[in-house]
Image: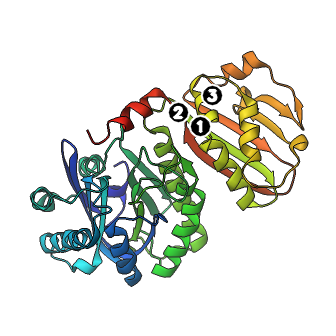
Amino acid sequence: MRSICAVEGVRAGGIKERKYGLALIRAEGTAAGVFTSNRVRAPCIDLMKKQIASGTLEAVIANSGCANAYTGPRGYTDAEWMGILAGETLGIDPEHVGVASTGVIGRYLDRLIIERQCRSVAPRLERSENAEEQAAQAIMTTDLVQKHALTERGRFRVAGICKGSGMIAPRMGTMLAFLYTDAEVDASTLQKLLRRVTRRTFNRVVVDGDMSTNDIALCTATGESGRVNEGNLEPALGECCRSLAMQIAADGEGATKLIEVRVHGAPDEESADAIARAIVTSPLVKTAVYGEDPNWGRVVAAAGFAGVEFDPYRISLSIGEEEGKVPLVDRGAIVVDLSKAKQAMQGKQVVFELVLEEGSGQATAWGCDLTEGYVKINGRYTT
C-alpha cells in the first residue's frame, strides 16, 4: 500500500465521475487541523474550525468539482449536511466527521450527486491500495497525478494523500490533505506538531501566488501502534508533509519543472522563509526556469524584495546540487559559467541555493515554472 491504508485503523474509498468526485475515509482517533487564512473562506472551513476543537475525528468526507465557497448561509447548511450524510451512512456522530470541498468557487453543492456518490462509496470502504487510489483520485481537480506519501518509523507510520495543483500560495494553497498515523498522541500535541510542520512544508509551496478559500489539512492518530515520543513523531510527520508539498509543486498547473530554493545564513528562520518564498513566487524567476535561462539576477532581485535586511555583496548563489552544482555568485562576485548553468536547468527539478552569511536561519521553499499551459488551464476554468 502506498500511503494511508498502510496505517493501522484506516479504511478508504472514493468515486470520480467526470469533474465530480467524492472520497470517504474512516479512521477513529485524536485529530488536529490547519486551515486557509483567506478572509473569503468556504463554509466547511468555519465548520471544521469549530468541530476540530473536540480533538476527535472518526471519518472524513470530501467532494471535488464544487468548492461550496462564497455561498453564504446556504453553503454552511450544505457543509453541515455533508457531515450528517457521512455520519448517517457510516453510523457515526456527524460532529466527528471531517468535511472538505474543492472545485469552482461561487457555486452551490449538488446534493443529489453528493448523496448518490456517498451512498455508493460507504459500503465499499476497505484497507487496500486500490481503495486509497480511489480516494486520491476522487479529490483531484486540475491535478494530473495522485499524491501519496508514507513514512515508516519502526513500529509506527505516518501517511497522507492530498490534492493541489493551482491557486497555490504560502499559508497553504488550494490543497486538501488528509494525514494519518497509527501512533498514539493526544490532540493538543498533535495540533502543535501539525501547525509546526505545516509552517515548514505546505506553507512554503507556491505555484501562482493566489490563496485558496478551501485549504485544509486534517491529521488523525488512530493510536493502534501505541504511544510515540513527540520527538520521534514530528520528523516523521514532517517527512510525510514535505513529500506531499513537493508533489503539489511539481504538479503545478501547466508546470514542466519543480523549483526548490534553499536559503542558508539568514538572520533567522523567519527571514530565510520570507526570502525562499519570494524567490519561488517571482514570475520572472519562474519563467526563466521554464526557458532554462540561468538569469541569476532575477533570483537575487527577488531575494531583495522579501523585506529582509542583508548585504547583497556578501551573498553566494548556486544552481544544481551535489556534483552538478554550479556557482553563480560568490560573496557578491559574479562567477557564472552560463553553459554549465544552463545545463543544470535541463532536468525536471531546478535547485537554487542562496547563502547570506547574516546568521544561522535556513528554510526551503518549493514552486514550479510558469508556462503557457497555466494560462490555458485558468483562462477556461469555468467554461
Q: What residue is shown with label 1?
A: 283
Q: Which image quarter: residue 330?
A: top right
At label 2, the amino acid type is Leu
The numbered disc on residue 370 is 2
Q: Amino acid at mark 3?
A: Ala
Front position in the image: 85 or 109: 109
**Vertical placement of 275 versus 95: above or below?**
above
For the residue labelled by badge 2, is the local secondary structure a helix, a strand or a loop?
loop
Q: Is residue 7 left or right of residue 343?
A: left
Cα–Cα gap, marks 2 and 1: 7 Å
Q: Earlier in the sequence, mark 3 or mark 1?
A: 1
The residue sitting at 19% across, 41% down in the picture is 18
The residue where tag 3 is placed is 288
Residue 346 % position (x, y) = 60, 22
The kind of secondary structure element at disc 3 is helix
Give the residue displayed 85% in from the left and 42% down from the top. Answer: 315
Q: Are marks 3 and 1 in contact (CB under 8 Å)?
A: no
Callout 2–callout 1 Cβ contact below 8 Å: yes
Residue 381 drawn above or below residue 33: above
Amino acid type at circle 1 is Pro
